[in-house]
Amino acid sequence: MKHKLLGSWEIKKTNTSSGLKKVVISVTSIILGLIFAGLFVLLTGKNPLELYTEIVQSSVGSIYGLSETIVEMIPLALCSLGVSLAFRMQLWNIGAEGQFYMGAFGATYFALFFSGLPKLVLLPLMLLAGLICGGLWALIPALPKAFWNVNETISSLLLNYVAYLWIAYLVYGPWKDPKGNNFPLTKQFSDNGTIPVFGNTRISYALFLMAIIAVILFFILKYSKWGYEIRVSGSSRKAADYAGMSYIKNVLMVMFLSGAISGIAGMAEVSGVLHRLQQTISPGYGYTAILIALLARLNPISILLVSFLMGGLLVGGYSLQTSGFPSSMVSMFQGSILFFVLAGEIFNNYRLVRKKA
Amino acid sequence: MVEMRKITKEFPGILANDQVSLVVNKGEIHALLGENGAGKSTLMSVLTGLYRPDGGEIYIEGKKVEFSSPKDAVNKGIGMVHQHFKLVQPFTVAENIMLSIKGLKQIYNLKEIERQIIEQSEAFGLSIDPKAKIWQLSVGEQQRVEIIKLLLLGAKFLILDEPTAVLTPQEAKALYTTLQKMAASGKAIVIISHKMNEVMENTDSITVLRDGRSIGTVQTKTTNEIELAKMMVGRNISSTTGKTLSAKTDILMTLANVSALGDNGLLKLKNISMDIYKGEILGIAGVDGNGQKELAETVAGLRSAKQGTIAFCGKDCTKSGRKKRINLGISYVPEDRMTTGLVTDLNAYENVALKSYRKYPGAFISWDKVKHDSEQLIEKFDVRLASMSNPVKMMSGGNIQKLLLAREIDSNPKLIIAVYPMRGLDIGATDYVRRLLIGESEKGKTVLLISEDLEDILSMTDRIIVMHGGEIMGVVKPNETSREEIGLMMAGKRKVGLHEA
């Protein structure tokens, strides 16, 4: 194609892209995204550099900041691992937020009504309940998808609101702490219902859970028969049928597991960080998780890395409030970065070359 | 007159056209002949403005032109009928043609457009009803719509990509009559093809491409098929398959009164009863879309029978799905290699695993073993590829088919279903696939060969079933029948005195 804009340069398609090139493109895209978002900060009369310095300092500049970043990273990474599994099969599960809330619901049920059980029994029980509730919640859009090919994108998204309102009903109604001054929260979990933390940080041992799940997923996808079936089904459903793989079974299993991992994230949040269920337990972890999964190209190990960065951005965002910005400013940064990273994708497949004379 | 001078086009890793020159004169039908991957399609994509050449020039009527988009090419009178038609199914013929008219007014005169369509169709014997909806038309009629569209756009140079691949022999004949009329009226026509007999019968001159280079242009009158074959492949190829007919009597598979629905929910297989004998090559002839695909899928276990029973090796397997049929030893080479038979985003050895991945014990696949087996397979079946780790979509058509066949044959099946296995392949690859399938049948394997190419059906099979409209029109032996008899059955005339298949 000839474009006058490019002058003596032209865009050529390449089918290969080296690892180094990918990294350079990603980093450049992120920087450009930050510069773009910085323009809007400039409009408010503030210096964007100062703002970014502030974000970096508050998120990784101190032990406290770093620990808070890791606290945010755990639910982000878990939800992202969950959705990335579904994405591998081209199942667009964007209901991680709802699955997170339902996981928290399942875990809270046991924490509240079986609080007397010993820790070694109660915690696994809560984990199992969170996992199953999250998984079942994801099965609701999966069933019509598997049997009648109903678009799962919309149904999984809409179920987020149902889950959110279900939790609202519980914390405003039957599960409200009678001694809580009428705040919409349950009473605090007994010590047996809480995941231990590292030292005097807020980082819970759910960090191990996150790492283990990431590694397991990595191996499942890369080396297992089931992971292979997921990849084949994701690339071509016809080919999956042709090879005798059960598409229906795989849709149900993948969606259940995808929701279950987000459910585990919800359990880890109430049991490891908040120690109670309340109306708002997530600043949109389930949505940010989608962005992380895409930025990490669905690779479980990259997801951990990107989750750490996004966690840092969230923590930095909280600190922005002191300089007069809303913390939702972070959403703008995220959006800007995503925009540039996705636009930068084109350079992985195309190359700018000087025209031959 | 169109002249392409020293066209060069390079893709990453492939020199698709290397200084190719082509001259097409007004009033002639010019064939562009060559194996798959020889660069025919690339060259025509350059001419239609789809690709920009890296080198070389195009002249139209002596003037140098440069196309930056297909629109520019259309404006210069160049039009192409693609293998896959670009028509809107629920629209009428007139509405489809209207879509591509330049500068159509907001308020248009449909009657006038319909009148023009009838005028053009009568001029060249392309009978078509402008009010008919596309989905109601046969493939041959849809092709006519594409041609009329180009004529109304003012095309003086028509390029047709494998125009007869989807036609009955009778339709193909009618098409060439039309093309000859168009040439006589001063248009220049380019046919992309690899069917030599067709090119010999119907064209005026032939340019042969091989490995991205032009081997030469010859006048059809002064050449013969053997010379062309030599030009195309650079080596001698015998056209006989050396097949000896055999009459087998042991039954491998039986279909009794089987009916099945098509993808659109309509009955596509009607009460089919047939036996497949052990060790035979059973050919299914018919025009594309007459139930052959559904038959193949029903036998393979991908489509469930609505009625009737299916037995394999004496055991009922009507209800068993694809996975069970794979385990029974039913291999399947589907019509659609690129989306069904292979996963083109995955690499060569990951595609080989599509059949064998279940054999590994436990939950994991031994990818080292898969790679090792794939290397042997690729060597045994002479599959050429740059690297086993590249996505399959980067391989050439012939090698993609070889990889698919290699995988399906190597799993030691009892029955190999091959649907249009030679379609779109060049002489070299076609010859290879023929020998491969005949060789397998000599080793005792049974082959169900579905093809629309009578040449293949007649030269390769032991028995031929002809299908039309989802029904069996007749069963014949290749040495006791003729093209005409099969052609008539393909058109829907039932063989008199039809006995049990």
Image: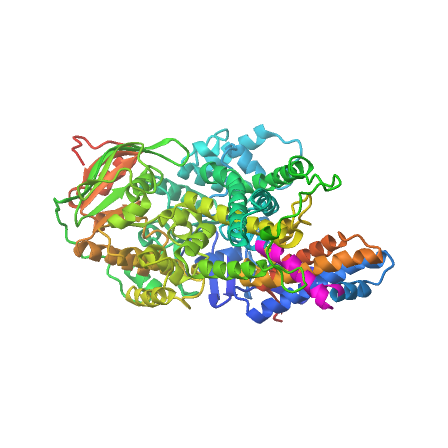
Q: Is residue B289 visible?
A: yes
* Residue B122 lies within the magenta run: no
- Looking at the image, residue B6 sits to the left or right of residue B69; the answer is left
Picture coordinates of residue B326, whole percent (x, y): 29, 49
Front one among B173 and B375? B375
- Looking at the image, residue B426 sits to the left or right of residue B439; the answer is right
- Residue located at (65% from left, 54% from top): A273
Span highlighted in magenta in the image: A58-78
- Residue located at (31% from left, 61% from top): B428
Q: Is residue A317 above or below residue B75?
A: below
The color scheme shown is: rainbow
- Looking at the image, residue B200 sits to the left or right of residue A70; the answer is left
* Residue A76 lies within the magenta run: yes
Front one among A295 and A54? A54
- Looking at the image, residue B425 sits to the left or right of residue A92; the answer is left
Picture coordinates of residue A266, whole percent (x, y): 60, 49
Q: Can residue B398 be seen in this view?
A: no
User: Most prominent secondary structure in the magenta stretch?
Assistant: helix
State which quadrant residue A2 falls in: bottom right
Front one among A40 and A126? A126
- Residue located at (21% from left, 35% from top): B474
Q: In this view, does B119 lie above or below A212?
A: above
Q: Is residue A61 above or below residue B260?
A: below
Picture coordinates of residue B348, whole percent (x, y): 39, 62
Q: Locate the C terminus of chain B and report the quarter of the image it occupies.
A: top left
State which quadrant residue B174 falls in: top left
Picture coordinates of residue B117, whole percent (x, y): 52, 34
